[in-house]
Image: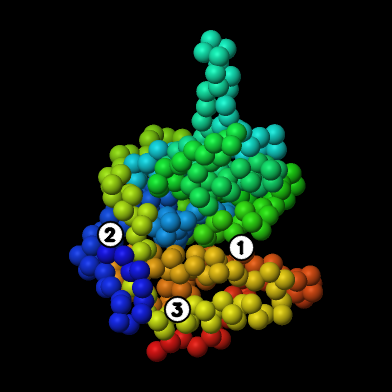
Amino acid sequence: MTNDSVLPDQTVLPDQTAISDQTAVAEKVLGRLEELVLGQREACEGLLATYMAGGHALLEGVPGIGKTLLARAFAAALGLDFNRVQFTPDLMPTDVTGTNVFQRDANTFQLVRGPIFTQVLMADEINRTPPKTQAALLEGMQERQVTIDGERHELDDVFFVVATQNPVEFEGTYPLPEAQLDRFLARIDMSLPGRDQEIELYRRAVAGKLTGWGFGDLGEPVISREEALELRRGSSRVHVSEDLLAYLAQLAQAVRDSEHLELAVSPRGALALLETARAAALLEGRDYLVPDDLKRFLVPCWDHRLILTAEAELEGHSSRRLLRSIADSVDVPK
């Protein structure tokens, strides 16, 4: 059941059996991802939580860390259609959305659909294409539809964008504008795997069993498409108390009150944190939200939405440290 209200006299509590079933389905997906993408449990959970919250994810990490593999493995585990677009400086908006092509024989125009007409779209190195082409994704990400020559075309119900970018390379790139960044529910950092996981990576390579890195396929789906669709609505099953709604509002206001920010968090950003935290609770097998769920995803959901003032940057401040400081300073409801 969906928690449409959190008022004490109207709260509809979720079905614990349904919660347990959803958690079990999610664990199947996480198990497959961890099997293929070694040493990235936190990134795998972040990506799945973003999907379950109904949003889109921006993966950030140095080249060769497995961003493309994670996106491909995610779609394969859920049994969803997958398209990958390599974003380049000469990519045009119609290369993403598609266009109407005149058919001389039939004397009419026919829609040639672009790669955006899929279920999981990987926008690889999204910051290597100009803003005009980046913006081609905005309507699809926000409204799950594409307008071509004035005609609207619906996208799939589970439409999910996984974009990637390299955080250390700036030459030949176009930083994502604020409106584009705001469409991503979370920015997920992928760090280097631990020593044991990296050695296991080498061991598989020596044995010729390094699945997904150019060696072999990604296996069969671990859940059905119906289960994948249910997961996309997963966060709606988690109950949120009135105290935690007030706590979320306090966190947002504390960010807005900071003198170090030129642009703070919007209501949409606060809602992004709320839904991602609800998905995280479900991944833990809980039907209710706790403060740690919100604190855990504070940086992934808000860091990319904030803009520091010029003075703050010169003084060495960072939005990440600011968010962690605010999380520590705002009183947690008892």
Classed neighbour count for the residue bearing mark 1: other residues with Cα under 10 Å, few (<14), some (14–19), many (≥20) = many
The image's mark for residue 22 is 2
Q: Secondary structure at mark 1?
A: helix
Q: Secondary structure at mark 2?
A: helix
The color scheme shown is rainbow
Q: Earlier in the sequence, mark 1 or mark 2?
A: 2
Circle 3 SS class:
helix
Q: CA distance from mark 2 to mark 3?
A: 24 Å
**Residue 104, located in which quarter of the rendered image?**
top right
Q: Amino acid at mark 3?
A: Leu
> Which callout, 2 or 3, points to the residue nearer the camera?
3
Q: CA distance from mark 1 to mark 3?
A: 22 Å
Which residue is identified by label 3?
245
Q: What quarter of the picture does the N terminus occupy? A: bottom left
Tell which circle, 2 or 3, labels the residue nearer the N-terminal end: 2
Q: Position of residue 21 (x, y in %)?
A: 23, 60
C-beta proximity under 8 Å, tags 2 and 3: no
Q: Nearer the viewer, residue 46 or 145?
A: 145
Q: Which residue is mark 1?
A: 304
Say few, some or many: other residues with alpha carbon within 10 Å of mark 2 (under 14 / 14 to 19 / 20 or more). Answer: many
Which of marks 3 and 1 precedes in the sequence?
Answer: 3
